[in-house]
């Protein structure tokens, strides 16, 4: 029987609460299959930093990299917490993992589930995937600041875009569009970010030649936010840079019924490193410890994880259990654990 080595990083805030439910579902769906998940828990995040001063040591990183996949809840403290001023958990932990493990595809599907209400009166059929570049863009550059704290301060952020990095994520997006409804939208800001924008546009144009059956279009990111609200059904695959993808996917989560439903995968498609699965949302300090968090995003991330590992039957069972649960939701009021239990119960049905 197959053993999958899974690194589990519950993290901070609601992270441990939603990961507990994700693990319940993972344990249940694999209970009667011939795959076993051998889990190692890593205590990382703002909590660990406050205790020990460590963010992500080289030993942690090496140990995590030994695994077949990673399940992460959320990391980071309350924005502006003075005790975390020098920690930079986001860069030093989350982005360090994404960069070191070459997660160049940040896969963020968005679906309006049957029966799910959202803020839009007439949303139509919404089912698209944002393929967000994960290793470059403004996230990797470190422009630096000079004369910090003086009236003459100059603060730079540098966006790094390589032909190699753009091409590999664009190719992934075209392959995905081909397996889906055959539509791909490049989202950028080519009218202003002329260097990076031109590179992205030229690479999309070139790869499009190899995929004549994929219909390609382009939107500036500001206009894309309009259409995500007025006509989200027009999208199939969106391919975009790291920062635009971050912003668009929180919006996409809100449009499809809430950020508590939005799952994601940080994927290294080449299989050189373990891929990492996590909700799109953060540690939600405002509701941490109250059992108000929706664990559906974390559970959906388990479905993406199973699919990535080639466990399509198990992935489909989890997705179906989520759909069934959502279709039967009658309002609010269930705790994090109650939602996790309900989805787990539907697995066995
Ligand atoms: P957030 O996503 O944590 O919260 C935004 C809002 O969404 C809050 O009102 C929160 O209560 C709500 N929310 C989030 N997840 C929810 C869920 N599952 N169910 C119900 N409501 C939910 O964003 P933020 O407040 O900007 O960030 C908080 C911390 O998390 C910061 O330190 C940030 O850097 C970090 N963060 C981490 C990740 C990650 O680990 N992948 C992602 C985003 C933000
Ligand atoms: C996300 C988060 C992260 C990002 C932060 C916490 C670094 O917002 O996963 O969407 O910007 O990628
Ligand atoms: Mn984000």
Image (cartoon, rainbow, N blue to C red):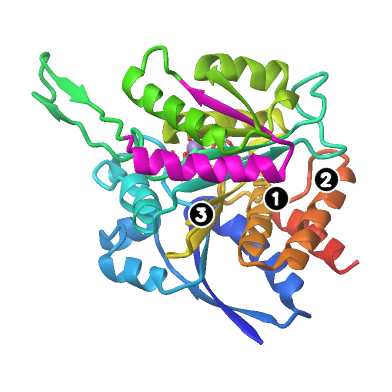
Q: Quadrant of residue 160?
A: top left
Mark positioned earlier in the residue sequence (1 or 3): 3
Residue 237 - label: none
Q: Secondary structure at mark 2?
A: helix
Q: Secondary structure at mark 3?
A: strand
- Residue 73 is covered by the magenta coloring: no
Prevailing SS of the magenta stretch: helix
Pinpoint residue 214: horizontal percent, then vertical percent.
Answer: 66, 33
Pinpoint residue 226: horizontal percent, then vertical percent.
Answer: 62, 15
Q: Is mark 1 within 8 Å of ligand 1?
A: yes
Q: Residues within 10 Å of mark 2 (few under 14, many from 20)?
A: some
Mark positioned earlier in the residue sequence (3 or 2): 3
- Which residue is tagged 1? 296
Q: Nearer the observer, disc 1 or disc 3? A: 3
- Relative to 22, say whether 227 is above or below: above
Pinpoint residue 297: horizontal percent, then vertical percent.
Answer: 65, 48
Q: Residue furthest bottom?
A: 1
Which quadrant of the rendered structure holds the C terminus?
bottom right
Q: Secondary structure at mark 1?
A: helix
Which quadrant of the rendered structure holds the N terminus?
bottom right
- Which residue is tagged 2? 326
Q: Gap in Å between the C-alphas at discs 1 and 3?
A: 20 Å
Q: Is mark 3 within 8 Å of ligand 2?
A: no
Q: Gap in Å between the C-alphas at discs 3 and 2?
A: 26 Å
- Which residue is tagged 3? 267
Q: Residue at x 71, y 15 (%)?
A: 230
Evaluate if marks 3 and 2 touch, with contact meaning CB atoms under 8 Å apart: no
Evaluate if marks 2 and 1 touch, with contact meaning CB atoms under 8 Å apart: yes
Range of the magenta residues? 161-188
């Amino acid at each position: 029987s197959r053993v999958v080595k899974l690194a589990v990083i519950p993290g901070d805030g609601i992270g441990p609460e939603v990961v507990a439910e994700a693990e319940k579902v993972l344990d249940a769906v694999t209970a009667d299959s011939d795959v076993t998940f051998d889990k190692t828990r890593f205590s990382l995040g703002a909590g660990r930093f406050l205790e020990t001063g460590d963010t992500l040591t080289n030993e942690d990183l090496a140990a995590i990299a030994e695994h077949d996949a990673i399940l992460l809840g959320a990391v980071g403290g309350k924005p502006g917490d003075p005790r975390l001023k020098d920690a930079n958990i986001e860069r030093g932990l989350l982005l360090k993992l994404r960069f070191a493990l070459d997660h160049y595809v940040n896969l963020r599907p968005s679906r309006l589930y049957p029966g799910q209400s959202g803020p839009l009166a007439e949303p139509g059929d919404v089912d698209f995937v944002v393929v967000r570049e994960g290793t470059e863009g403004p996230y990797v550059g470190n422009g630096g600041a000079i004369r910090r704290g003086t009236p003459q301060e100059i603060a730079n952020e540098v966006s790094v875009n390589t032909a190699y990095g753009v091409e590999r994520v664009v190719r992934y997006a075209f392959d995905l569009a081909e397996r889906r409804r055959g539509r791909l939208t490049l989202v950028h800001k080519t009218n202003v970010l002329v260097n990076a924008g031109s590179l992205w546009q030229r690479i999309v144009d070139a790869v499009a030649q190899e995929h004549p059956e994929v219909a390609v279009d382009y939107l500036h990111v500001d206009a894309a936010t309009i259409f995500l609200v007025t006509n989200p059904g027009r999208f199939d695959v969106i391919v975009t840079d790291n920062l635009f993808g971050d912003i668009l996917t929180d919006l996409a989560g809100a449009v499809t019924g809430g950020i508590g439903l939005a799952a994601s995968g940080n994927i290294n498609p080449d299989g050189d490193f373990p891929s990492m699965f996590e909700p799109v949302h953060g540690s939600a300090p405002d509701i941490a410890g109250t059992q108000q968090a929706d664990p559906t995003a974390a559970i959906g991330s388990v479905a993406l994880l199973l699919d990535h590992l080639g466990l399509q039957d198990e992935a489909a069972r989890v997705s179906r259990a989520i759909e069934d649960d959502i279709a039967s939701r009658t309002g609010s009021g269930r705790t994090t654990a109650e939602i996790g239990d309900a989805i787990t119960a539907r697995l066995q049905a």
